[in-house]
């Protein structure tokens, strides 16, 4: 790949990756804040339940598969020709963002709402929801925002150098628990202010992923960091934080 094509490919991926990431996060926040009642799916009854179940399942399944031994080569194949090694990370974030967009915009709403927050208590619910998002953003930042947002991939291609993944995160929220990103994701789901069957189904399904999914991540960390990860795992809890002075 010549320099001009490499630079244009990197910049194009930057635009697509981050635009999709921002849209996905915004769509998730809006959908959870409104009880998933603005999805564009038109199915009803059992068909809606089946379709929504598939939407719930596709995110954790594909998300985890692409990080496995069989899935990682697909990230290289799905990246622009000649840039798969550098852009695999950006491609992964881009595809994950598309999965979130698919979930929230293809969702078929039930139309049944159990609880809509009002008054002072409603304000507290929205404040708690915002706090959960801040926790998640903090966790992503502690893990390395360039990696979590996919920027490290296209940036490496732009400057024609290896991707910098950084060290194993052990500071910030990672000093309190080993999986603060998954914890933050679960908190965002459970603090959603509007309650209904749509919210409960999505939250239950993705909470299972938040509890079990990190096991695969820790297996990769074990391979990558060896004794450093074993020592870290021995002193830091898995998902429930332990704050120490």
Image (cartoon, rainbow, N blue to C red):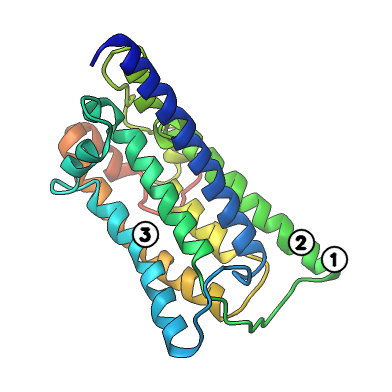
Position of 10 relative to 67 (above/below): above
Extreme-bottom residue of the structure: 45
Residue 193: percent from left, percent from top? 67, 67
**At which x and y percent is residue 6?**
32, 17
Q: Quick one: 233 or 57, which is closer to the camera?
A: 57
Whether the residues at callouts 1 and 2 have beta carbons within 8 Å, the answer is: yes
**For numbered disc 2, what is the local secondary structure?**
helix
Residue name at image x 45 percent, y 72 percent? 204
Mark 1: give few (<14), some (14-19) or many (20+) Cα within 10 Å. Answer: few
Distance, label 1 to label 3, CA atoms, is 35 Å
Q: Name the N-terminal-most of marks 1 and 3.
A: 3
114 displayed left or right of 122: left
Q: Residue at x 40, y 33 (%)?
A: 150
Q: Nearer the viewer, mark 2 or mark 3?
A: 3
The residue carrying pointer 3 sits among few (fewer than 14), some (14 to 19) or many (20 or more) residues within 10 Å by Cα, namely many
Horizontal and vertical percent position of residue 39: 57, 68
Q: Is residue 241 above or below residue 108?
A: above
**Can residue 168 be seen in the rendering of this structure?**
yes
Quarter holding the N terminus is top left
Disc marking residue 120: 1
The residue wearing badge 2 is 124
Residue at 37% over, 47% down: 95
Toward the viewer: 174 or 125?
Answer: 125
Residue 198 in picture, x, y percent from top left:
54, 76
Give the tally of numbered discs: 3
Q: Quadrant of residue 50?
A: bottom left
């Amino acid at each position: 790949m010549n320099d001009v094509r490499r630079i244009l490919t990197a910049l194009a991926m930057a635009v697509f990756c981050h635009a999709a990431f921002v849209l996905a996060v915004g769509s998730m926040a809006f959908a959870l804040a409104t009880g998933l009642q603005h999805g564009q799916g038109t199915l009803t009854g059992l068909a809606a339940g089946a379709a929504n179940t598939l939407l719930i399942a596709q995110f954790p399944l594909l998300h985890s598969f692409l990080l496995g031994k069989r899935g990682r080569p697909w990230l290289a194949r799905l990246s622009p020709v000649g840039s798969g090694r550098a852009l695999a990370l950006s491609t992964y974030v881009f595809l994950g963002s598309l999965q979130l967009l698919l979930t929230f915009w293809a969702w078929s709403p039930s139309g049944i709402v159990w609880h809509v927050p009002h008054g002072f208590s409603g304000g507290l619910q929205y404040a708690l929801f915002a706090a959960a998002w801040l926790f998640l953003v903090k966790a992503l930042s502690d893990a390395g925002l360039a990696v979590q947002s996919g920027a490290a991939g296209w940036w490496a291609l732009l400057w024609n150098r290896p991707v910098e993944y950084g060290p194993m995160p052990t500071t910030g929220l990672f000093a309190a628990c080993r999986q603060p990103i998954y914890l933050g994701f679960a908190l965002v789901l459970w603090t959603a202010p509007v309650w209904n069957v749509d919210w409960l189904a999505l939250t239950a399904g993705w909470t299972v992923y938040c509890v079990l999914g990190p096991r695969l991540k820790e297996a990769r960390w074990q391979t990558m960091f060896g004794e450093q990860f074993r020592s870290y795992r021995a002193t830091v809890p898995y998902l429930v934080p332990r704050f120490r002075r």
